[in-house]
Structures are given as structure tokens and as C-alpha cells.
Image (tube, coloured by chain):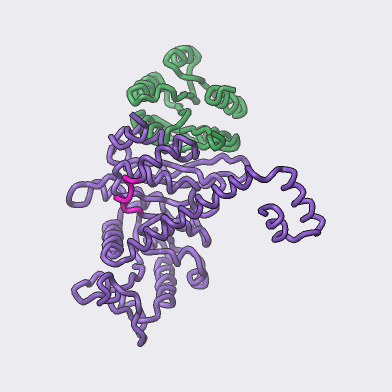
Chain colours: A purple, B green
Amino acid sequence: MTLAEEVLQGNRLALARVLTQVENETERGHQALNELFRRTGGAHLIGVTGPPGTGKSSLVNQLAYYYRNKLVGKPKRVGIVAVDPSSPFTGGAILGDRVRMRDLAGDNGVFIRSMASRGSLGGLAVATSGVVQVMDAAGFEIIFIETVGAGQAEVEIAHLAHTTLVVEAPGMGDDIQAIKAGILEIADILVVNKADRPGVETTARALRNMLQLAHPVPHVFSGIDSPGYSHHMVELSDHDEPVSTSGPTGEAPTIWIPPIQRTIATKGTGVVDLIEEIERHYKYLKETSELGQREQARLKSELDILLRERLVKRWRERVTETRYGQAVEKLLRREISPWQAVDYLID
Amino acid sequence: MGNQKVRVLVAKPGLDGHDRGAKVVARALRDAGMEVIYTGLRQTPEMIAESALQEDVDAIGISILSGAHMVLVPRLMELLRANGQESVKVFVGGIIPDEDVPRLIDMGISGVYGPGTSTERIVEEIRKIVVGN
């Protein structure tokens, strides 16, 4: 039996070993991904990002715990991929997200894997999407992907996850920070964690103002019988033009406005409401054409990355060190421009 | 296998709350280029074995200051074997009486480090035993 087959049979040690192979980008890892890929697509991928220290790990711990223990119906199997940064100097890393996830110990329906970013700058590791695919194929229905503590530009998670939570805490920057491009733009749900701390009103207001700037038009929702989509209306200013985004049937335009959810992760406060928002978002994705669009964008971006990697590698094999060195020499002497150097090396 | 990294789980089993030593070792391993999964205080052998499995680590470093090592260590070794992880190297740091050291080694522990051990020595020995050079 191959390692991938053992993973499909629920062997946790095999799963852990495949994840290592995938993370190390070995031949065996790629082989396993080839075998497992067609079994993927079943999981709801939930990204959790936000600045360091806002309580992402504690929140994931609580969310996973509720998914396992507190919701009605059959508990869903939960996978967690937690990424922490690698040292740019030594390549080493301290992966400490498990410290906050003690409540999940001893539950066979949960699998937590820590990953170091290994030099990647977008908030995830290069192999994170592969690791998520393996968990997906292994039958985890909910997969949380926790990014490294992220500030402004670490937006890779939006390409990987179906639902992205951006976790903030009271005491973030002023509302200019909130309207800068970047991480807040990718939020499907905004979470203000540590909501028992002073300043929570200011933070929530800054986020609300940002949303108003981002969505200044009234949104025509799919109807009064979908209250879930409409209650954000009250937060938004009025305007004349309707939004052109259409639902799957083309009749009723819908758009998702990120809700703002307050939580106190250490106490579990607000977690049930947050799960409701997460589920509501997933439902929205499925009922509109957006899930399909996101899947397409996600797989395309993954394909592009792999293509680029492979093409560079192939080119590397063909161009000699000497020729490459000559190009750099000429570049240094300002004889050719970087663009001419590219021409020189490729043709 | 150019991307391979040494992965080490650092855990603090038992009820004493002093994790300074564990943190110093974790930091030293990090600075030696290893990936350290730090799990924090009051871990049971079950929790440690489960984390070691999920994280597919090469080695486990546990810090015990409570005197309970002759209970905790055999249990951990038993669980690792039951999980098919007998290849994982286990290192023990903390307050271990001299006469217990050979008994721990007999149980399959790869190294025992008492107070005053240099982090360089710990890093070097872990690397030697895990990587084999």
C-alpha cells in the first residue's frame, strides 16, 4: 500500500509522514499529492490571519473546539495548519501555536500541524497549499489555516482559503491604518478579539468606517427572506446606484459585506456567533457563483506558481554558470540593462 | 532532500511550572537552524506523544524538574512505541539524580542533561544523533 492509500484509510502516522514529504517538497511528496489530489475539494478552508498577538491561535482553538463539541449534529473533523515564521538568519523556527490549542488534545477528530514559513513572505509557507490538500483528501471537513502574524501585505491566504478571517484586537492603529490597502481588504469576516479590553469600541468603529468606505452603495440583497445578507445594510450609508454583482440565477444581485464579530477567545465569548458567520459565508459562496470563481482563481494561482518554478528550474539547467556570470559582469559594468541581460540569457 | 529540516518537539510534562530551561533549549535549537515545536507547560505523556505524531518530529526534548521522570519517561516511551514512532529520539533535561541516568538510557533515552549543561553540547548531540553526523 502506498503512503497516500494509508492516508485515505485514516492512518494518522502515514498522514503525518506524507505532510513532512510534502513540506520538504520531495519526490515522494509530489507523488502522494498526485495520488491524493482528485480526492480534494471536500473541505471548507478557513484562513485565519491578522497581526501578531491578536489571539489567532486561541481563536482557532476555540473554533475547532466548538466545531467538535458544541454544535448540533455530527461533529466535523477538523484539521489545523498553523504557520509561524522561520528565522531569516538561521532558518530555524519556534512553532508555538500548539501552546494555545491544549483543549484539542486527545481528540482523534482533530489534527494539528505546525509549519515554518521557510523564507516565504506572504504569510504562508510554499508548501502550505500542498499540506492543506493532503488534509482535505484525508477527510478533514473543516481546515483552519493560521498564517504567521501578518500586518499589511501578507495576503496570500486569500488565494488559499474559502473564508478568510482577519483578527484584530483593540489598540491597533488609527483609521488611516484601517483604510490602507492590504490585509483588511481580504477579510470575509472581521474579528475584533480581546473584546473585553479597553478600546474595543474605537477598533470596531474604525473597521466599520472602513467597510463603509469600501461599500458606499446600498446593496440589493436576494430578498427579505434572507435576513442574513441584509442586516449589514444598517451599517452602510445610502446611495443610488445598485451593485451589479449577480447571483447564480442572474435575477437577484447579492454581495457579501464582511461582518464584524467581537470575540473573547480565551473565554469562548462570541465564538458561536462567529461560527454562524463562517457558515453563512460558506453558504453564500455556494449559493452564488463565487465558490466556483474562487476555486478557479485558487487553482490557477497555484498552477502559475508551479509553472514559474518549473520553468525557472528548466532554464537553469540549460544556461551555464559561465554564461550567467558573464551576464552579471556586463550588468555590473553597466554595459547592458537588466532587461537586456534577460534577453541575453533566455535567447 | 535539500529542504529537510530537523524538527524537535520541546515539552514540559508534569506539574511543576518552571519552563525557563525548556525555553532556553528551544531557542538554542532554533538558532541552530532547527524547527522547534514548543508545546508549553503541564503536558501529559499522552499529549506529548500525540503532538510528536502529528508533527512527525525527529526528536523530543522534555524538561522534568519534579522528580517524576521515572513515571513520565517510561509512559512516553511506551506511547511512542504504540504509535509506531520508536525511531523518534528522546532527550531529557532537568533535575535527574545520577543513579537514574543509566536507567533512563536503558529505556531508550538518547541523552540526559542536568543543570549546567551548555546549550552547545545539547544542540551538537541532538544534531549528531538525529542527522547522524
Q: How many marks?
A: 0
Q: Quadrant of the C terminus of chain B?
A: top right
Q: Is residue B112 visible?
A: yes
Q: Residue at x 48, y 50 (%)?
A: A124
Give the x, y percent position of residue A274: 30, 59
Which residue is pictured at 53% across the width and 35% down the height?
A: B5
The structure residue drawn at horizontal position 59% and vertical position 29%, both measured from the top left corner, is: B119
User: Which contiguous range is marked in magenta?
Assistant: A38-45
Tell which of A204 and A74 is nearer to you.
A74
Position of residue B106 measured from the top left corner of the image (x, y, whole percent): 44, 12
Q: Is residue A347 above or below residue B41?
A: below
In the picture provided, is A276 more to the left or to the right than A212?
left
Residue for point 26% across, 62% down? A283
Along the horizontal axis of the image, is A46 left or right of A50? Answer: left
Q: Is residue A158 left or right of residue A315?
A: left
Answer left or right for A226 relative to A311.
left
Depth check: A244 or A272 in front?
A: A244
The verdict on residue A299 being magenta is no
Give the x, y percent position of residue A303: 46, 53
In which quadrant of the rendered view does residue B30 lie? top right
